[in-house]
Amino acid sequence: MSTVYLNGSFVPKDQAKVSVFDHGYLYGDGVFEGIRAYAGRIFRLEEHIDRLYDSAQAICLNVPMTKPEMAEVCAQTCARNGIDDGYIRLVVSRGEGNLGLDPNLAKEPNVVCIASQIQMYPEEFIEKGLRLVTAATRRNYGEVLAPQVKSCNYLPNIMACLEARNAGAHEAICMSREGYLAECTGDNIFLVKDGVLKTPHHGVGILRGITRKAVLEIAAELEIPTEETFLNRWDVYSADEIFVTGTAAELVPVTNVDARTIGNGVQGPMTRRLREAFHRLVRTEGYPIPKPQEAQAI
Ligand code: PMP
């Protein structure tokens, strides 16, 4: 049976339990990360951990360990579950409190790390591409909760996801309050127009995706011109290519938005090139996962 890290111990999956009084459960009060391991190395682990701690800082949540300790938790959780290629979920919730929402009454955060397998989209979608809709639900904006905070409150994203599902689509595109293209419910979005790779500027109010950053770096290396800019629905409909990026989804083409066929209705050439480069990159760097026999007590 798989093993879960819970507050300093590794416990069998069926014993990995937190209180129903945890404010993560009662109020979505917590932060999380989704991280991937490829070929025995955890991709951009330090960046994920930095983002987790920044999110925690933004909600006054004190993560009860150092960043290097957190990195080891991730590596050891993979090692103990025999995960070389897989997905890691890190959650730090406010912890057990009472029925009021005052976070100060929760004294001890709960820290959970799960290492498992994930497949967001079957292989067939790489050629066929995804179908997206633009959602009526807006990306939550900074005056409410900074979109850079990867909090356990994903209800706006879930509302947009429901819109997609109800329309028979795979994913939803959320606009900013001002009507600019922001991102999807669990991924960032890129367009290709006339040879230029475009993605919403972070000032629009998006999660600063680690995959997004990696793709922009790859594009720079390949000397593909890029723009982080302000885009709207028209830019989406008239794009030559579209793809989404995220740790779980990786890099997946989009071939239909709001019933408009994008480009030729199949994966475009720049998407293919970037996708191949991305899959090469993830296998060439990362935080090493120890061999199972080197797994240690934490
Ligand atoms: N936007 C949202 C809302 C997300 O949940 C995610 C997934 N973490 C992303 C974008 C993509 O970010 P990353 O590439 O860091 O996984």
Image (cartoon, rainbow, N blue to C red):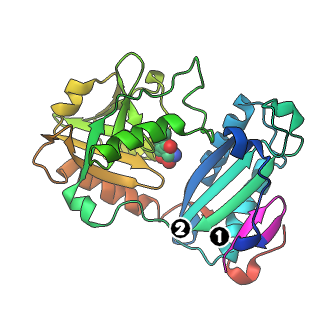
> From the viewer's perspective, is 161 left or right of 125?
right
Q: x%, y% of residue 30?
A: 70, 41
Label 1 beta carbon less than 8 Å to ligand 1:
no
Percent x, y of residue 165: 34, 47
Viewer-proximal residue, 44 or 4? Answer: 4
Which circle's residue, 2 or 1, is located before the other in the chain? 1
Label 2 sits on residue: 86
Asked where in the image residue 106 lies, by quadrant, the reply is top right
Q: Residue at x 79, y 70 (%)?
A: 10
In the rendered structure, find residue 78 and report the number of the disc placed on it.
1
Magenta stretch bounds: 1-10
Res. 1 image quadrant: bottom right
Q: CA distance from mark 2 to mark 1?
A: 8 Å
Which SS class for mark 2? strand
Taking the image as shown, residue 154 lies to the left or right of residue 98, namely left
Residue type at the position of mark 1 = Cys
Does 114 sit above or below residue 146? below
Q: Residues within 10 Å of mark 2 (few under 14, many from 20)?
A: many
Q: Nearer the viewer, residue 50 or 179?
A: 179
Please tell me whether residue 205 is drawn above or below residue 158 in the rendered image: above
Question: Do callouts 2 and 1 mark residues in contact (Cβ within 8 Å)?
Answer: yes
